[in-house]
């Protein structure tokens, strides 16, 4: 492949190959069995012939995701160039798969990894798989908002000094709420100590293309970054990118990815990554400028309502909130006497507005490349009306979103240990062997190997009463929980 081909960001090689394939009128005697939709007319009517016609299997003209040598390889090179990475992998198992590949590429059984406890469950899932030992840096908490913040430099330095044998430092960039740590400094700390630095950028695709954004992981020198293109980048749900820096071995990372990722990569997902990357390179700067403007306007309007607090860059303190994602529209609701999840439910049930999530004290409206000002006006108006119609006395509302865990065993040891199911209400003092979390955002309240405390039980019960969607345990009613024998 020529250098010109690699950097020609007007190209979308997977999309182009699928367009050529569509014109070839190939007779399929391979999978998938719907045979370009002919075998499943209801599916074809629902999704359309254009869609099912390119839901095809790997073949020479279309390359193979497990070992790409042509159009998928070209798409990876273009993505790497667009994001400033040494290499990029197209991922079809969501950013969960990207995050797990980062951990599995750098950690093996018994290795230590330094990370904040407010990580997505996919990180701890990876520890269950590989047997690595978490060294948690408990995040500072904003007591007014009830949210966990970023990693303080001093805490990271302390963890590195106390665990010089750790192999990696893991950072959220940003958190679900838009909070960023001092990533450049943390990368330098990790590298100076001979460790890798891994970044979960599930909510940071736009950092690579917008102006006035927090630093991206690749620009900060991180070794790996998981980028959720389907969130703010506009690709189809479940499509993601895994970016790596020059210190990583491309072949080794590919082998790790192939341990868990499907051998039947979806061309719908891959082509959406290809097209979305091109779109972001060509239009990202102006598009995300408008997204920031919409978010700033919405913050002003929501704060003018009274009772709500749409927070932003005024929270920056140079350390635990080193920077803030200006596209994030997070709104604190507790001062109108309603939990975030209650406002979330009211917006959907009363106003036909679906936001990203509501938790105990906040809501998040996810703004990205597909939003328009008139839809934001509708959200602002609905929030004003919710305050007028449903405001309550806020006394007695729980505020804390994060409870420091007491880690007793590694996630892998606890997950596979002998266990028994007991009533949740009787489990205080026991060691949990499964996950409990509100989803979204998917940050565990309890993870395998952590001691169950009364504060945690009170939080879970409160979340259930308020209507949070709790997931994780074997018992779908979450009346019982698995604990170590």
Image (tube, rainbow, N blue to C red):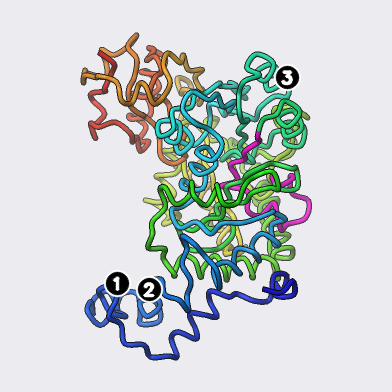
Who's the residue at 50% across and 26% down the image?
401
In the image, residue 198 lies in the stretch drawn in magenta: yes
Image quadrant of residue 84?
Answer: bottom right
Is residue 400 found left or right of 139 in the rendered image?
left
Pick the residue in front: 27 or 326: 27
Residue 474 horizontal/vertical position (percent): 25, 32
Sequence-wise first label, 2 or 3: 2
Q: Nearer the viewer, mark 2 or mark 3?
A: 2
Q: Residue shown at 48%/17% (left/top)?
A: 405
In this orientation, does residue 391 appear? no
Whether tag 1 and tag 2 are in contact, CB under 8 A, the answer is yes
Mark 2 burial class by Cα count in 10 Å: few <14, some 14-19, many 20+: many
- 405 left or right of 313? left
Question: What segment is highlighted magenta in the picture?
Answer: 196-217
Using the image, determine if residue 181 lies above or below residue 423.
below
Image position, residue 420 (x, y; %): 21, 19
Disc 1 element: loop
452 or 82: nearer the viewer: 82
Kindly report which numbered mark, 1 or 2, lies closer to the viewer in this rendering.
Answer: 1
Position in image of residue 36 (x %, y %): 32, 80
The residue wearing badge 2 is 55
Residue under label 1, please give it.
32
Tell me if 122 is positioned left or right of 138 in this view: left
Of the pair 119 and 340, the residue shown nearer to us = 119
The residue at which mark 3 appears reads as 154
| Residue 355 belongs to the span the image colors magenta | no
Residue at figure coordinates x 46%, y 67% from the top left? 64
Mark 2–mark 3 Cα distance, whole angstroms, equals 50 Å
Using the image as rendered, state which of residue 121 and residue 67 is in the foreground: 67
Does residue 213 lie above or below 92 as drawn?
above
Question: What whole-number distance in Å separates the C-alpha atoms at marks 1 and 2?
Answer: 8 Å
x and y percent of residue 319 in the render? 74, 27
């Amino acid at each position: 492949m020529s250098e010109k081909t690699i950097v020609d960001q007007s190209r979308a090689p997977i999309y182009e190959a699928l367009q050529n394939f569509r014109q070839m009128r190939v007779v399929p005697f391979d999978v998938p069995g719907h045979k370009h939709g002919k075998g499943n007319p209801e599916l074809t009517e629902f999704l359309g012939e254009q869609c099912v016609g390119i839901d095809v299997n790997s073949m020479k003209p279309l390359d193979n995701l497990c070992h790409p040598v042509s159009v998928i390889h070209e798409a990876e090179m273009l993505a790497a160039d667009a994001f400033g990475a040494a290499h990029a992998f197209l991922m079809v198992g969501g950013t969960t798969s990207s995050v797990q590949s980062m951990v599995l590429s750098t950690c093996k059984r018994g290795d230590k990894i330094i990370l904040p406890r407010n990580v997505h469950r996919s990180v701890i899932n990876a520890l269950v798989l590989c047997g690595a030992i978490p060294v948690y840096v408990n995040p500072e908490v904003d007591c007014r908002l009830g949210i966990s913040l970023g990693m303080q430099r001093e805490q990271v330095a302390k963890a590195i000094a106390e665990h010089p044998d750790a192999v990696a430092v893991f950072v959220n960039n940003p958190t679900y709420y838009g909070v960023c740590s001092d990533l450049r400094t943390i990368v330098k700390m990790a590298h100076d100590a001979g460790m890798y630095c891994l970044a979960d950028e599930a909510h940071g695709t736009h950092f690579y293309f917008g102006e006035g954004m927090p630093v991206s992981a690749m620009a900060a020198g991180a070794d790996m970054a998981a980028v959720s293109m389907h969130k703010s980048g506009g690709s189809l749900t479940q499509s993601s990118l895994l970016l790596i820096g020059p210190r990583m071995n491309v072949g080794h990372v590919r082998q790790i990815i192939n341990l868990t990722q499907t051998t039947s990569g979806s061309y719908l997902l891959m082509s959406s990554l290809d097209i979305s990357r091109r779109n972001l390179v060509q239009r990202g700067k102006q598009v995300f400028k408008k997204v920031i403007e919409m978010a700033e306007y919405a913050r002003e309007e929501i704060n003018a309502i009274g009772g709500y607090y749409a927070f932003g860059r005024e929270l920056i303190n140079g350390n635990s909130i080193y920077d803030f994602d200006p596209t994030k529209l997070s709104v604190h609701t507790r001062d109108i006497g309603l939990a975030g999840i209650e406002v979330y439910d009211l917006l959907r049930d009363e106003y036909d507005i679906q936001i990203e999530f509501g938790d105990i004290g906040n809501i998040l409206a996810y703004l990205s490349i597909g939003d328009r000002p008139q839809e934001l006006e509708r959200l602002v108006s609905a929030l004003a009306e919710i305050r007028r119609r449903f405001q309550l006395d806020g006394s007695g509302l729980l505020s804390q979103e994060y409870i420091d865990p007491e880690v007793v065993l590694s996630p892998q040891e606890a997950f596979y240990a002998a266990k028994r199911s007991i009533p949740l209400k009787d489990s205080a003092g026991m060691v949990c062997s499964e996950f409990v979390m509100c989803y979204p955002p998917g940050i565990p309240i309890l993870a395998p190997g952590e001691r169950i405390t009364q504060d945690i039980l009170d939080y879970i019960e409160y979340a259930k009463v308020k209507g949070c969607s709790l997931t994780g345990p074997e018992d779908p009613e979450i009346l019982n929980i698995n604990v170590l024998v």
